[in-house]
Amino acid sequence: MVSYTLKVNGKERQISADEDTPLLWILRDELNLVGTKFGCGIGQCGACTVHINGQANRSCLLKAAALEGMEITTIEGLATDDTLHPVQEAWKEHDVPQCGYCQAGQIMTAASFLAENPAPSGDEIRQAMHGNICRCAAYNRIEKAVATAAKNG
Amino acid sequence: MIEERKKFTFSRRGFIRTSALAGGGILLGVNFLNACKESAQPPVNIANLNFKEFNAFIKIAENGYVTIFSPNPEIGQGVKTSMPMLIAEELDVPWEHVTVEQAGLDTENFTRQVAGGSQSIRHGWEPLRQTGAIAKQMLIQAAAARWEVEPYTCTASNGVITNQAGKQLGYGDVVNDAALLPVPENAVLKDPKDFKIIGKDAINVDVHKIVTGQPLYGLDYTAPGMKYASVLRPPAFGQTLKSFDASEAKKVGGVIDVLKFGDKVAVIANNTWAAMKGKHKLTAQWNDTTLESTEDHDAKLNAILNGSKFEVRREDGNVNSAFSEADSVIERTYESPFLPHNCMEPMNFYANVTAERIHLVGPIQTPAGTAKRIAHVLERDEKEIDLEMTRMGGGFGRRLYGDFAEEAALISNGAKLPIKVVFSREDDMAAGTYRPAIKYRIKAALKDGKVTAYHLKEAAINSNMYGLIPHFFPAGAIKNYKVETGNYQSNITTGAWRAPYTNFLAFAEQSFFDEIAKELAIDPVKLRMDLLDNVNDGEDERIEYSAARMKETIKLAAEKGNWGKAAENVYQGFAAYYSHNTHVAEVVDITLQNGFPKVEKVTVAVDCGIVVNPTGAINQVEGGVIDGIGHAMYGNFAFDNGKPKATNFDAYRLIRMNETPKVETYFVENNLSPTGLGEPGLPPAGGALANAITAATGKRMLTQPFIEHFNTDTREVRG
Ligand code: FES
Ligand code: FES
């Protein structure tokens, strides 16, 4: 067991957990932030995507204890107060989700991608999003929503 | 004019009850599959909703706002949005005044759904609209009584009742009076041309919760004192547990107990990570029984096809004499592998088994059957079980099976703790209920430019096509026709997978029609239209598809997909298929990139009757089509001595965004009752893609996945 402090969605959180625990399980089981999803545990599906200092990262592969001092943002912290992030708005506008399980990860990937590339081409969107699996295959709408978010962002 | 041939009927007598709510307003309880019991009464207090007697509740409050307590499990098919639309339409309230709600919560931050069974839009179509119409009728009666006029002189629209003198009352103004009225037997339903909500886009009711990451799914559920369990199961089908050693597992921080049940060992811990880590530290010895490999299945299925032990599922005319008189005969064998479901949310379930009650919560498509199963294994009374459904991170058939719920119940019972069983992805893929491997051998006799006989043999693992599938197209279109089946009993568990059987049967048959068309030198679309001309709708009770509707659907797809007019270097494939009461036709456009097929576009025409919620419907169709393309292209799941060769997404390939075609969906417009959309888009996709690949490369895709026909290093067609 080790103790450390994480900064999650702008708040300092005290953690006491096994040293090798991935951030994913700290978020879900310790901090009750269950918006970040478990899909594969090996970095293949993107369901667990969060932002570390603004960069999209796979929380199933990150050891939480190594993230002290970094800004961690989860899907629960993407909106500012009552204003949704443009990506979340676009997701609603296009009625993207089917089962919805993958969508938090998709949104987090899209948000960090658009921060780096605010005016992407269709091909750039398709490449940037290809690490996130949607088993329901809502891919056409995810693509459209990313393009809309780029326009409105 | 296309007539509706089969209607779903429901018992109209007493399927609705009302009560005046304690806090004001009216509550309507509906039971839309069976009439309510004589004694059934909806509660006067919203906190006591009882979904055993009723499968939906509608509350109209004193401000006129409507709350619908939707009981249907949401797998991603959008029924939680589309079913309330039916009620709101006939009740005639603005959709903005309708909230779809969950029953009361027992933990602060969890949104749950209460068991009620999964009924499709097809079953709900009449009774849910009747419910809305009856409620509207009662509100009008209450207003008319207040005005002392005859009810028929009043009209209601957008939540407001108007009389001939132009006076108005809102629904909320009269709701308490309406609550005291007897329920009318019947109410007049709207003419579809007057629909205001049905046919308009309604966004998924859970979308805000989904995009903001609120707890919805089984994996998100928590309860006080809950512990997590990770289960070690036999690594191969055909193995049993000989012995195990838990000493290392127990040393893992956070692990609190290790429990053997049957051939499985559960590691119970304070959090998911500790449970998973603990499981990896278990060591176990296994006894081998029969360990099967993909090569064994291959040989068994071939032996069935080459043998003579079949069950005849449909037989018309005499195929043998037609074959002996034929000008030519074509025969092909099509093969598909096992497929795992891979729901994005791995299997999981919560159970708290105590001496008094059994509390079960999780993502399950069959709550009633699962409760029964658990009562049976625990030797308890079913009445002691409360089962609640959560939103599901995908279903595709996997969550019809309650094995994971049973595990949770057994572990909780043994450990005397509230337990949530969590599958890792590896557990989920290796302890599946797979789409069985199947082979089809199809033979057709051709004479004077016509198909005179059609003989299809199915060899499948564990079980065969069922219900009316043997009577799907081309049954009825070819005079001499025979479908027969055989199976091999394996110890690998198999079950329903999105569009069971037809998910592969459609591929085989639709590829085969293209071969016939080539042999007869006619256009593949024309071949299908000609065959459909032979069918007289309604002549054969067992034939559910409508030739007239199928032809309309085919025409629409061919027109919108520019069939036969592809741009240069674009190759097209066509398929049309009826399943789950819906007719679908698809045109697939591909190009070759360094010899490798790239699926550019799929044009889909769908006849699903009235489209209740277009945005939801299109989402379903797009998903089904891409799922069909993805699995036909990449889906492969092989066994080696009982062990799956792939257990995670590094080795098992699912389609990703950069491999995804654009899907354009068109609906055949008519006023017929709506039919399902979760599955029917999938079956034709693989066949249409196979035909496009053949058009591009000349090579026939007789086996799935298609990717194996290409050398992915050099990206050239192999063979
Ligand atoms: S759960 Fe982290 S990438 Fe799949
Ligand atoms: S919406 Fe179901 S996995 Fe993406």
Image (cartoon, rainbow, N blue to C red):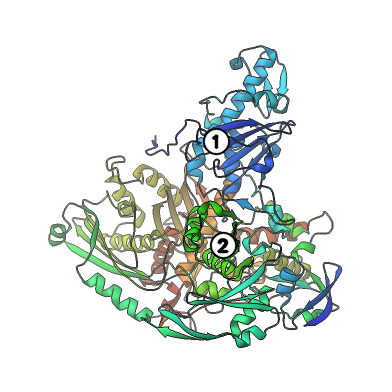
Name the disc covering residue B365, or none.
Answer: none
Q: Are marks 1 and 2 on the same chain?
A: no
Q: What chain is tagged by disc 2? A: A
Beta carbon of the mark 2 residue lies under 8 A of ligand 2: yes
Q: Position of residue A103 (x, y in %)?
A: 66, 62
**Category of crowding for the residue at label 1, using alpha-carbon neighbours closer than 10 angstroms: few (below 14), some (14–19), many (at least 20):** some
- Secondary structure of the residue carrying numbered label 1: loop
Q: Left or right: A70 with respect to B307?
A: right
Q: What chain is tagged by disc 1? A: B
What residue appears at the point 48 percent right and 43 percent down from the top-left corner?
A: B122
Q: Name which quarter of the figure residue B389 lies in.
A: bottom right
Q: Is residue B232 visible?
A: no
Tell me the mark number nearer the camera, choosing from 1 and 2.
1
Q: Position of residue B154 (x, y in %)?
A: 63, 18
- The quarter of the image that holds ligand 2 is bottom right
Residue holding disc 2: A137
Q: Which amino acid does label 2 sit on?
A: Ala
Q: Where is residue B301 in the image (x, y as percent from the top left)?
A: 30, 73
Name the disc covering residue B40, or none.
Answer: 1
